[in-house]
Image: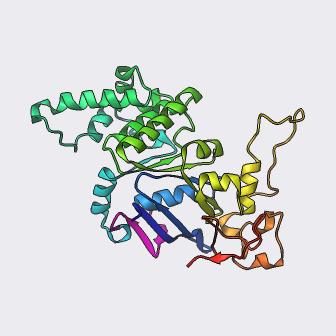
Amino acid sequence: MPLLDIRNLTIELETPNGIIKAVDRVNLSINPGEIRGLVGESGSGKSLVAKAIMGILSDRWHVSADRLRYNSIDLLSLSAKERRKLMGSEIAMVFQEPSSCLDPNDTVGHQLHESLATIAPDVPFFQRKQWREVRIRQLLHKVGIRDHLRVMNSYPHELSEGMCQKVLIAMAIAYKPRLLIADEPTTDIESGARVQIFKLFKKLNQLNDVSILLITHDLEQIENWTQTITVMYSGQSVESGRTKDIFKQPFHPYTMALLQSMPHFGDKLAHKSQLNALSGCVPTMQHLPIGCRLGPRCPNAQRRCVEMPQMQKSKGHYYSCHFPIDYDEPNEKEQ
């Protein structure tokens, strides 16, 4: 049974010009102990999917789904109080903009103490403050912060974005969640510490059986640290499956374009040569093309692409394209 099971997730936004589908019928599942990557260009809807799981979208957004379940719990049927309790103990998220998630009027140490206040360890109540101090020091050391006293006595604006991101990661793993959603977790962190953060995630996954949804646009991170991958474009899921299979043989033209845009330093590149990239840009939500949303940019587009492609299955992974790449077997439509 999947730990997280999402079927036909749709997220709509009310605007003066009508309703816009920012996320359209996305399917996503994560098994216990699985690390799944969610990849795509900026504006593809990755962060919206994560926020819909956490239940933190504003009232302007309308979330609907045939199925949005965590374990055996229907997330859409929970009250706000029940959702907060679940998110505090079972599901945690590392946000993309750390400075906007920390209270600027309070020290980092006090915020860390507050984040651990609801944990009831098996120690006498008069020793819990000391327990929290030891636990905070351990968490900060785990994410690569050695000068923990300076960080705890600082306000968020006195720390770098990378340091604030490490603090958020420490808060996220404090409750030992079963599902960790990491939205660009190492964007502002120095390169030397990125590997340490990913090793920490891998350790949580292997030792504590933590499932991880890694949201990023860095395909190198996806290739090295994930087991399965879902590719999104313009609010839709276009391909998903095992990471090594998709990297070896992608079926969707957009997935192929993403892989071709990765620099291969072993190749002999001409001086100042350009990286491969699709022409055009991601369409705005107000002006989405009919049919396949990649159609105006797709090198394989044909007249049939004005019709919306259905999700199909082949060789262990799913894709939605009328003209898949290097595919010579009959298509199997998803049941």
Residue at (74, 66) in percent of width and height: 294
Q: Quadrant of residue 250?
A: bottom right
Figure quadrant of the C terminus: bottom right
Name the foreground residue: 149 vs 137. 137
* Left or right: 97 in relation to 105: right
Figure quadrant of the N terminus: bottom left
* Chain part drawn in magenta: 58-73
Q: Is residue 292 magenta?
A: no
* Left or right: 10 in relation to 1: right
Q: Quadrant of residue 286?
A: bottom right
Residue at (42, 51) in percent of width and height: 33
Q: Is residue 318 placed above or below 118 in the rendered structure? A: below
Which percent across, then down, holds residue 245? 64, 55
Name the foreground residue: 202 vs 47. 202
Whether residue 40 can be seen here:
no
Which percent across, then down, holds residue 119? 22, 43
Which percent across, then down, holds residue 229? 58, 55
Q: Quadrant of residue 82?
A: bottom left
Residue at (83, 74) in percent of width and height: 302
Name the foreground residue: 277 vs 287. 277
Which percent across, then down, holds residue 180? 42, 49
